[in-house]
Image (tube, rainbow, N blue to C red):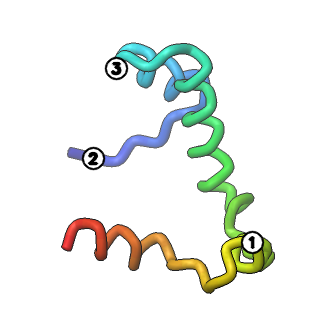
């Protein structure tokens, strides 16, 4: 299997073909694009303040979830 980047419209269609509805597919494709562009990497600390404890990095959370 080889990684092959695709644009948002193409990914949206791939996700729709996999059974997602138009809105969900578009949301996920746009989220993927924004993540790749680094637009979601800034941490303000607001979530930690809201929940009253430090947040858990995604990698650590996933490792804990799969045991």
The quarter of the picture where the N terminus appears is top left
**Of 40 and 51, which appears nearest the observer?**
51
Asked whether, in this view, residue 5 is left or right of residue 8, the answer is left
Cα gap from disc 3 to disc 2, whole angstroms: 19 Å
Q: Point out residue 61 in the picture as x, y percentages from the top left corner.
A: 40, 72
Label 2 environment density (alpha carbons within 10 Å; few <14, some 14–19, many ≥20): few
Displayed quadrant of residue 38: bottom right
The tag earlier along the polypeptide, 3 or 1, is 3
Displayed quadrant of residue 66: bottom left
Q: What secondary structure is marked by label 2?
A: loop
Q: What secondary structure is marked by label 1?
A: helix
Q: Are marks 3 and 2 in contact (CB under 8 Å)?
A: no
Cα gap from disc 2 to disc 1, whole angstroms: 41 Å
**Front disc: 3 or 2:** 3
Residue for point 44% across, 19% down: 20
The tag earlier along the polypeptide, 2 or 1, is 2
- Residue at mark 2: 2
Q: What secondary structure is marked by label 3?
A: loop
The quarter of the picture where the C terminus appears is bottom left
- Residue at mark 1: 50
Asked whether, in this view, residue 1 is left or right of residue 17, the answer is left
The tag earlier along the polypeptide, 3 or 2, is 2
Q: Point out residue 5 in the picture as x, y percentages from the top left corner.
A: 47, 42
**Of 41 and 5, which appears nearest the observer?**
41
**Of 30 and 58, which appears nearest the observer?**
58
**Front disc: 3 or 1:** 1
Residue for point 50% across, 35% down: 6
- Residue at mark 3: 18
Residue for point 43% across, 24% down: 15
**Front disc: 2 or 1:** 1
């Amino acid at each position: 299997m080889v990684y092959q980047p695709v644009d948002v419209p193409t990914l949206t269609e791939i996700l729709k073909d996999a059974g997602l509805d138009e809105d969900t597919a578009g949301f996920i494709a746009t989220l993927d694009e924004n993540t790749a562009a680094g637009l979601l990497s800034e941490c303000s600390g607001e979530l930690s303040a809201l929940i009253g404890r430090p947040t858990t990095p995604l990698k650590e959370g996933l490792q804990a979830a799969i045991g």
